[in-house]
Amino acid sequence: MHSPTIPFRLVSTQREEQLAQFNARKEIAWFGFRGAFEEPGLAIINFTKIESGLQGGGGTSAINGGVIAAGFDAAFVLAGLGHYDSKVVITLELSVKFLSLALVNGSLAFQAHVVRSAKNFSFAEGFLSQAGTGPAQHLAIATAMVAPAR
């Protein structure tokens, strides 16, 4: 699963504003997430901290599946914020496939990008992996549909 990435619609100054507001959100900080944009159209979510409450999947040495779903949700929303001039992007659909335990012993990163886009919604795909590993090392993959809030 890796469809071509659609480049961001918003210019870099607009994306910087979107990113600052996204990273300031309380739920993003609560999970320990931090977002970033990477050209041409990649949204990246990293953990700034991993509290014990985020663990529990496959034992206490792995990230809980619900937290992984939340990380994908954040990544897809951030990808949508790079395309829509809206302060809020919502997730209409989210599908996650778990491939391997997301152990806490490395630097985990969610990556997401829009693969098809229209005025009122976009389709996106993404993956979770240890930073610096190749596509064969995906721990989870996901697809989503996101839309700007009205």
Image (cartoon, rainbow, N blue to C red):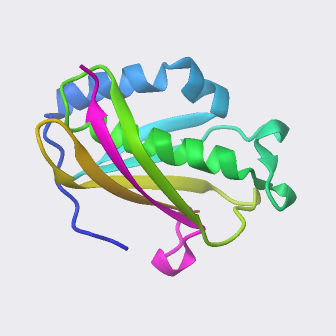
The residue depicted at 25 percent of the width and 31 percent of the height is: 15
**67 sits left or right of 128 in the view:** right
- Picture layout, residue 124 above or below residue 134: above
**15 sits left or right of 34 in the view:** left
Q: Quarter holding the C terminus? A: top left
Indicate yes or no whether the magenta region holds residue 101: no
The residue depicted at 48 percent of the width and 56 percent of the height is: 95
Q: Which percent across, then down, holds residue 5?
A: 22, 60
The residue depicted at 21 percent of the width and 41 percent of the height is: 121
Give whichever of 41, 117 is nearer the camera: 117
The residue depicted at 62 percent of the width and 72 percent of the height is: 99
Quadrant hosting residue 77: top left
Residue range in magenta is 130-150
**126 sits left or right of 64 in the view:** left
- Picture layout, residue 69 above or below residue 139: above
Quadrant hosting residue 18: top left
Q: Which percent across, then down, holds residue 106?
A: 69, 60
Q: Quarter holding the N terminus? A: bottom left
Indicate yes or no whether the magenta region holds residue 143: yes
Q: Which percent across, then down, holds residue 41?
A: 24, 51
Number of marks in the rendered image: 0
- Picture layout, residue 33 above or below residue 125: above
Report the residue that reaches farthest toward the right: 59
Q: Which percent across, then down, holds residue 143?
A: 40, 58
